[in-house]
Amino acid sequence: MKIAVMDAGIGLLAAAAAIRRLRPDADLVLSSDPDGMSWGPRTPQDITARALAVAESAAAHRPQALVVACNTATVHALPVLRARFEPELPVIGTVPAVGPAAAGGGPVAVWATPATTKSPYLRALIRQFAVGVTVTGVPCPGLSDAVERADEAALGRAIAAAARRTPDDVAALVLGCTHYELVADRIRAAVRRPGLPPLVLHGSADAVAAQALRRTGRLPAPEAPATGTLTVLLSGRAAALPASVATYSAGRLLLRGHSDGALPDRPPGRVGAGAGGSPG
């Protein structure tokens, strides 16, 4: 079994690591676009064109599924990608886990890029899956770029600024950008409130990984032999993973080439997943 995972940058690590944990024997193709980063400030047409190019590079390796591990690309390019590749190649999108977070009754905060927090897409998710629940969009300028560069100082500033913009009464926090899942432990620490239970963080990687297996007709087999290979494509070029990935537990898992249980960057308790209930 071979599964491709695509993103503009290393935000794809969380989904790829989740797949690796479920199926250590799966071959992974990681296709990103360092030449075109960041996608967020680009026009929808440009995002779609770049996403198509990244997807074509991955599809050339003949995977059984393609995971679009990027909220921005899912919003703007998913219909085009599906029209291009399906039904031969199932395409799985990634959307913020608003539904699972709102199911607890709220209030809910959604950390996302400034463009996503203002998008009709996020407003539609809230209308559909968070009826009667207060949902606050928290823009996180610079956070995904800081994660990409593994810039400790910039990470600290961006997370602290977003934590200050997060209402004190929220019960759940949605990680609305795949990059943010790589620093979930730091985010949880930043929003910790003395004397109150830790916030439940909701990401998308686990649900996306499970959906990728469903679309390929495979069941999870976490005890399978760790025989899966790793192919890395950077703007279409065969390459190694960037050195910055070793900063994150998901990257270290992939570099080791096998699964060895829970990752230290995963916060205690569950990290919910999916959009209004499941990935796209």
Image (cartoon, grey):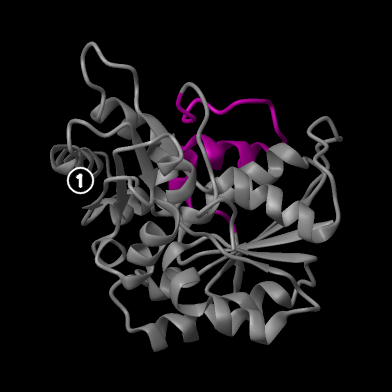
Q: Callout 1: few (<14), some (14-19), or many (20+) C-alpha neighbours within 10 Å?
A: many
Query: Can residue 257 be seen at all in this image of the molecule?
Result: no
Q: Is 16 displayed left or right of 140 in the figure? A: right
Instruction: Give the image location of residue 10, x and y in percent.
Output: 47, 55
The C terminus: image quadrant: bottom right
268 versus 56 height, above or below:
above
Q: Considering only vertical position in the picture, is 241 above or below 59?
A: above
Image coords of residue 32 (percent x, y): 52, 66
Q: Which residues are magenta?
A: 240-267
* Residue at (80% x, 40% y) in the render: 220
Residue 75 lies, with reference to residue 268, above or below; the image says: below
Residue 279: x percent and y percent?
59, 57
x then y, percent, for residue 103? 46, 40
Residue name at image x 22 percent, y 20 percent: 193
Residue 89 seen from this side: yes
Please tell me whether residue 21 is drawn above or below residue 263 in the rendered image. below
246 vs 201, nearest the viewer: 201
Q: Nearer the viewer, residue 69 or 225?
A: 69
Residue 263 falls within the magenta-colored stretch: yes
Q: Residue at x 33, y 29 (%)?
A: 188
Residue at disc 1, secondary structure: helix
Q: Residue furthest top?
A: 195
Assess whether residue 113 is covered by the magenta stretch. no
Most foreground residue, 29 or 49:
49
Left or right of 175 on screen, residue 28: right
Task: Say what amino acid the circle numbered 1 marks.
Answer: Ala
Q: Residue at x 14, y 43 (%)?
A: 165
Residue underneath mark 1: 158
Quadrant holding the N terminus: bottom right
Count of numbered marks: 1
